[in-house]
Image (spheres, grey):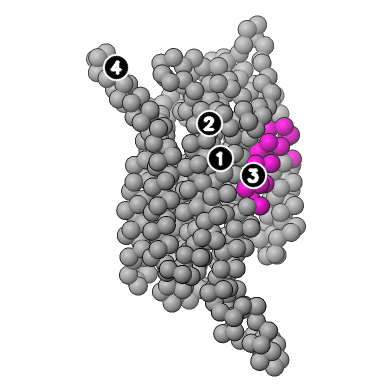
Amino acid sequence: MAWPSIFRRGTLLSRFSHHHVAVFLLTFFSYSLLHASRKTFSNVKVSISKQWTPSAVNRSIEPVEIWSSNHLFPSAEEATLFLGTLDTIFLFSYAVGLFISGIVGDRLNLRYVLSFGMCSSALVYAFLVTAAVQFAGGIVIFFGLLVSPEEIGLLGIEAEENVEEDSHRPLINGAENEDEYEPNYSVQEGSTITQVKAISFYQACCLPGVIPYSLAYACLKLVNYSFFFWLPFYLSNNFGWKEAEADKLSIWYDVGGIIGGTLQGFISDVLQKRAPVLALSLFLAIGALVGYSRSPNDKSINALLMAVTGFFIGGPSNMISSAISADLGRQELIQGSSEALATVTGIVDGTGSIGAAVGQYLVSLIQDNLGWMWVFYFFILMTSCTIVFISPLIVREMCSLMQRRHVRILSE
């Protein structure tokens, strides 16, 4: 199997400069700050639930009976439902913001959009420490982030003449036969760079693969964000572990997702196909969910099963929201224009957030009425729906891989 040109010896280091490293680090830490700010709320759900119900004793109020007679909810079950409602409201707002920011990001300077988003969200955030760090990160982004090579006098991707064709070729394009692909990222006639205008929201939705991956991500993000928002609460509620211990243990799900996203993304780059890698991971995710739902009351075993579940669920989720969204936003039909990238990413991620928003209330409702085991059955159903939505893409890419292998055998 031939490796993509970017992984060949000497190619990787020669293609990247310190500017690439700076951009990577700035965007990485920016997303880390945003992710940390969202994670904080899920880490304190147990404490919030106790504070809102009569079983909590608030020593700061005298006499103590005043707190019990003025509680917000009569039971922990009603408090849990309200927490699910808060998650749903947050994620619906998040989804709307993703759609809007995607459109705005294709029309304004991305540095201004990211900086404004980080600083403004920090100003309205409830947790002081994370808000202060996030606001500082927004200032650093404003002064330090490069959004295009032209800002430092270098040629853009569309203007590079001496680059191998495959190095900027998206793994998803509108051509049914990959042999018909002709790269459109090079200099146009007369060495004049054709600037493609930002495409409309409707045009972005009509691009091949955008709708299937968006619907698939709605189901998968529901599962991934349910772990994200409810895992510490589940560990405390189901096993009786202390909140601090549950918070620390839940990190292993993120560890599995990080490793899974990196490894699966690398494999899909080598294969030059995304859907088959996703399909295999999601099939294994169903088994991982069954295994984790039956985890014993042992922290070591639970952490191991949790990491495996994160690998097979968080990994594909990270791939769809990053690599696949980038592929969809720079496919052949739009000539690799970066002016569609933010819009397409906003559609995929925004649709995913709508699914996740609906799921948060359903998780609290199912748990309250049927128990945690039925929550896992719900996760298995949503993971299966993810596979169904991308099944046409799986079939097409598997046929393409088999055709490529057949051609290689004949040529040998």
Any mark on residue 327, and which? none
Whole-angstrom CA distance, mark 4 to mark 3, is 42 Å
Magenta-drawn stretch contains 101: yes
- The amino acid type of the residue labelled 2 equals Leu
Q: Amino acid at mark 4?
A: Val
Task: Single out the mark in the foreground, 1 or 4.
Answer: 1
Magenta region, main secondary structure: helix
Mark 4 = which residue?
Answer: 407
Is label 4 in a helix, a strand or a loop? helix
Where residue 303 sits, quadrant-wise, is bottom left
Secondary structure found at label 1: helix
Tell me the distance, in whole angstroms, between the alpha carbons under discs 1 and 4: 34 Å
Nearest the eye: 389 or 6: 389
Magenta stretch, residue numbers: 93-112
Residue at 57%, 29% (x, y): give it. 206
State the mark number for residue 348: 1
Who comes first in sequence, dot 4 or dot 2?
2
Q: Which residue is mark 3?
A: 98
Residue under numbered circle 2: 328
Tell me if 95 is positioned left or right of 409 in this view.
Answer: right
Task: Choose the circle earlier in sequence order: 2 or 3.
Answer: 3
Quarter in which the N terminus is drawn: top left
In this rendering, is residue 213 above or below 1?
below
